Amino acid sequence: MSAWVLPDHIADVLPSEARHIEELRRQLLDTARGYGFELVMPPLLEHLESLLSGTGEALDLQTFKLVDQLSGRTMGLRADTTPQVARIDAHLLNRRGVTRLCYCGPVLHARPDRPHASREPLQFGAEIYGHSGLEADTEVLRLALDCLRAAGVTERVQGAVIVDLADARIVQSLLDGVRLDSAVVPRVHAALAAKDLSSLRTLTAGFPATAREGLLALPQLYGDVAVLDEARRALPDSPALRAALSDLRQLAGRVEGAKVSFDLADLRGYAYYSGVRFGMYTDGATDALVRGGRYDEVGAVFGRNRPAVGFSLDVRELVGVLPAQPLRAAIRAPWSDAADLGRAIAELRAHGETVVCVLPGHDSEIDEFHCDRELVARNGQWTVQPL
């Protein structure tokens, strides 16, 4: 095997795509800043016990592990940034009121989470800590939609954005009081997410009748807002269930510029979700472009159990569903050490223009930029002329 062949599900990013990714990263961060979110930059690796505190088995299996040559302790390369941001909120900032934080950086997955997925996503996310009301869920949902708008998804991708809503409290309420082996819970979650009724019947065979019937009803509870009324009839009544269905109805009414659907059996994503959760879909994407929701327990392991809600997306995957950008317009200039030419080029670049100096013997080569103008000497002055 050639030494330069990259590992499976790892890829280089070439100029046009890299430029698109970087421009989109800036747009997303600027959009979050417009809502008052502050940028944080957690480290790529941490001691393993800190990185995986309270995150569950799924994230543990996705985390690359290595030994620190300085301390001899086991370290991990982050597979998700949310636990790190929760640590920052709990220990480094330690604010009493609302904290809005955003981030954008690479994460590494030990295995792809679906076919053809990258193991090196560029994860952008935004999170609100310190407010338990539905107002925070609403703001996060609206920010996520505005991020897709800023990316041009609503303009450049055919088909509307679909916001799919669910709530972790529904399944939690059905399992409340059921004595379960810890290994069974993720299998029940997986069967629900896959709508695998056969496996679900087997797994729930020894459950109390009320819990079993409710769990078996969930895979059919998907569709438009009428699903919420159907859920009230089909599922056993409980305060948690009533609160979940009420929050889902209210949140759906606050979504603007997108279609809303419900899938009450959807449990995909990491295990720290504790309330309303959502995914955003559009044509051309093989999975949700955005995933988010409420995860009030995520900071508990750091000694500060604060309300929390947020979302994340993979910038590289988002670029993949958008049309390729045209080459960037640029100005062609001759190569010379002449001081007056250097000043003319510097002034153009200071005004935001891209000026490509053509090296001798390379006049006709193709590159990342579309040179539609050229810098030429006219009457002792350097001027820009159309090509």
Image (cartoon, grey):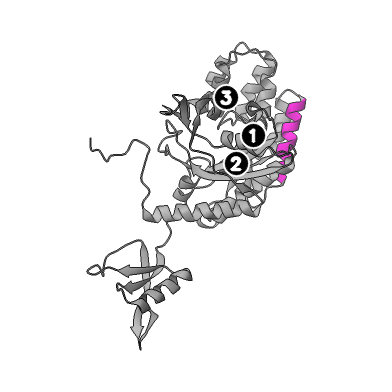
- Amino acid at dot 1: His
Disc 2 target residue:
311
Q: Which residues are magenta?
A: 239-253
User: Where in the figure is residue 151, as x and y percent of width and height?
Assistant: 53, 54
- Identify whether 197 is placed above or below 317: above
Q: Residues within 10 Å of mark 1 (few under 14, many from 20)?
A: some
User: Where in the figure is residue 222, as x and y percent of width and height?
Assistant: 62, 34
User: Which of the labelled discs sits on residue 91, or is there none?
Assistant: 1
User: Where in the figure is residue 9, as x and y percent of width and height?
Assistant: 37, 37
Q: Nearer the viewer, residue 18 or 47?
A: 47
Disc 3 target residue:
189
Q: Nearer the viewer, residue 273 or 97?
A: 97
- Asked which quadrant contains residue 235, the reply is top right
The nearer-to-camera label among 2 and 3 is 2
- Amino acid at dot 2: Phe
The nearer-to-camera label among 3 and 1 is 1
- Asked which quadrant contains residue 364, the reply is bottom left
Specify whether residue 248 is painted magenta. Answer: yes
User: Which of the labelled discs sits on residue 150, or is there none?
Assistant: none
User: Where in the figure is residue 269, as x and y percent of width and height?
Assistant: 55, 32
Q: Earlier in the sequence, mark 3 or mark 1?
A: 1
Q: Earlier in the sequence, mark 2 or mark 3?
A: 3
Mark 2–mark 1 contact, CB under 8 Å? no
Q: Earlier in the sequence, mark 2 or mark 1?
A: 1
Q: Is residue 91 visible?
A: yes
Inter-mark Cα distance, 2 to 1: 21 Å
Inter-mark Cα distance, 2 to 3: 20 Å
Q: Residues within 10 Å of mark 2 (few under 14, many from 20)?
A: many
Looking at the rendered structure, the secondary structure element under dot 3 is helix
Quarter of the image with the N terminus is top left
